[in-house]
Amino acid sequence: MSALPDVTPGTPGGDLPTETATASGQPDGGALTSGQPAAVAIAPQPVIPVSLLTAHPGNVRRDLDLTPDFVASIAANGVLVPLRITRGTDGAFRVIDGHRRLAAAIQAGLADVPPSLPEILVLRVFLNAPLAVFNLIPIPPLDGGNVLGGLLPARLAAGFDRVRPYGFLLLYALMLTGGLELLVAPPYHFLVSWLPTK
């Protein structure tokens, strides 16, 4: 007997992937014929919550033409074309291209939408900047404490190192008293002021 599957006219050949129906009757698209390599997993596309997005004030489009078919398509497939967003001086994320897709996503009840690649990179910088600033606070065991300990003369470094067991307590105290925001906010705003906002 041949190991190759029987091929009849009008059916996929042995060299093509075939779809099998799931319990819901929908094709899963994942079943391959014998001898085919396994499908490569695609990393999920980064998304941003729709609750963080607002329309750009310069948007001149008022009639979004949200037809039922378009909203149903967004509800079924999600937003396939990423939105272009920017960040204003007030820190808000504004949509500069994709207002219709965003409105349809909101109407369809989607929680998030994909931004385009440049906006993803800027967004990640905005999200990581406060973490970087926090990590540089000169309190052990944060990296800032280790850097300061390495810069101090040996005698002062030995005294500074005695603070290490109490570092987390100092950080908790700063968090509870609001001092942490005073330490992180100014350098954070200075860093993000160098990023494009328009």
Image (cartoon, rainbow, N blue to C red):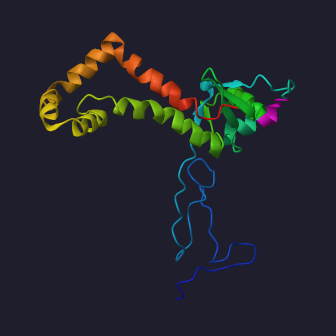
Residue 5 image position (x, y, % from top left) = 59, 79
Residue visible at 64% across and 44% down in the picture: 118
Residue 195 image position (x, y, % from top left) = 60, 35
Question: For residue 125: magenta?
Answer: no
Q: Is residue 163 left or right of residue 101?
A: left
Image: 9 above or below 53: below
Q: Is residue 102 left or right of residue 67?
A: left
Residue 154 image position (x, y, % from top left) = 14, 38
Residue visible at 52% across and 27% down in the picture: 190
- Along the viewing direction, whichever of 7 and 37 lies nearer the viewer: 37
Name the residue furthest top.
177
Quadrant housing residue 101: top right
Residue 24 image position (x, y, % from top left) = 59, 47
Quarter placement of the C terminus: top right
The residue range painted magenta reads 65-70
Image: 108 above or below 174: below
